[in-house]
Image (cartoon, rainbow, N blue to C red):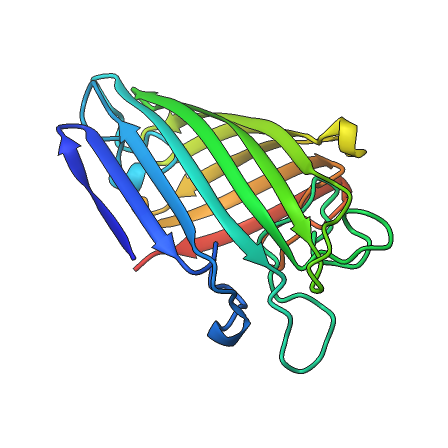
Amino acid sequence: MWGSGEALPGLNYTVMLGNNLTTLNVNAGEDSRDFAASGNISWMPTTHEFGPKGGMGDFENHQKLATRFGTAYTQGRQNAALSSSGSDQPDSTQVRMADSLLPFAKDAVVAGYTVDILKYQMWALDAGMKYRGLHLQAEAYVRQLSDFYTATDVRVPQNRVTDTGFYAQAAKMIRPRKTEAYVGSSVVFGDKSAGYRTSYDFIQGLNFFLFDTRNCRINLHVIEVYRAPTSSVFGYYVGGQKGVTVSAGWSINF
């Protein structure tokens, strides 16, 4: 269940209550009976908007400074969502430790233990501005994983793991509604007291808008990665990756 709206001009909110942090790759039979909840508030004081869907880049070429400030909080009890086929591989893959391992994998949190359920909490702050083709955006967050238990209800000897991080990005329309260049970086400060390290990346890219619309573009993208803290078949990162990824894509939105 979720609700969203505009409490005051330029002040938007979204709240959610669900039975999981995400339904991706997890079916109802694998869910626990715990709930997850989240909320987001965004304030756009100057223009009361931030472009279509709040998207990246100032394609619209704001002549008046557009600003957005936001905060979000999420928490939930997350389980491994083990498959009914008897496999010991968790289907719950949306939460990862700062070294990119799934917390529900064997020995991932503490050697000799396999976590089956944990408590997830994340708080984030973000701010951005758009003005005459320039877009600046930044976000900082803190995430805490705690209350680790095995499937036999044994408490894992690791009270909590707290990671922090941020990202910052700048984009500029070189040719209005035609060509955009952008750079950005993100850093994850793994919890050193729990044995985790820092990871970071640096990105640079170009967008070419073919038909004077956001909905059709060619993208050239270069990512320099040092110890990727995440891994996904949907993205550019492989857990632990060190090196450079180069991509080219053509996207059309209908």
Q: Nearer the viewer, residue 248 or 38?
A: 38
Percent across and percent down for residue 16 are: 33, 50
Horizontal side of residue 93 vs 214, given as left or right: right
* Residue closest to the eye, 119 or 211: 119
In the picture, the quarter occupied by the N terminus is: bottom left
Q: Which residue of the protein is positioned furthest toward the right in this rendering? A: 112
In the image, residue 42 above or below residue 84:
above
Q: Which residue lies furthest to the left in this view?
A: 9
Q: Nearer the viewer, residue 95 or 76?
A: 76
Which residue is nearer to you in this view: 32 or 44?
32
Residue 224: quadrant of the picture: top right
In-image side of 32 versus 110 (left or right): left
Q: In which quarter of the image is the C terminus?
A: bottom left
Check the image and report above or below for 59 versus 231. above
Q: Is residue 212 visible?
A: no
The answer to whether residue 114 is left or right of residue 82 is right
Q: Which residue is drawn at 39% across and 22% down?
A: 127
Image quadrant in which you'd find residue 135: top left
Instruction: Pinpoint residue 200: horizontal percent, then vertical percent.
Output: 68, 31
**Residue 81 position (above or below residue 168):** below
User: Can residue 70 be seen here?
Assistant: yes
| Count of marks, rendered view | 0
Residue 13 image offset from top left, x and y in percent: 25, 37
- In the rendered image, residue 117, in percent from the top left (x then y), is placed at 62, 56
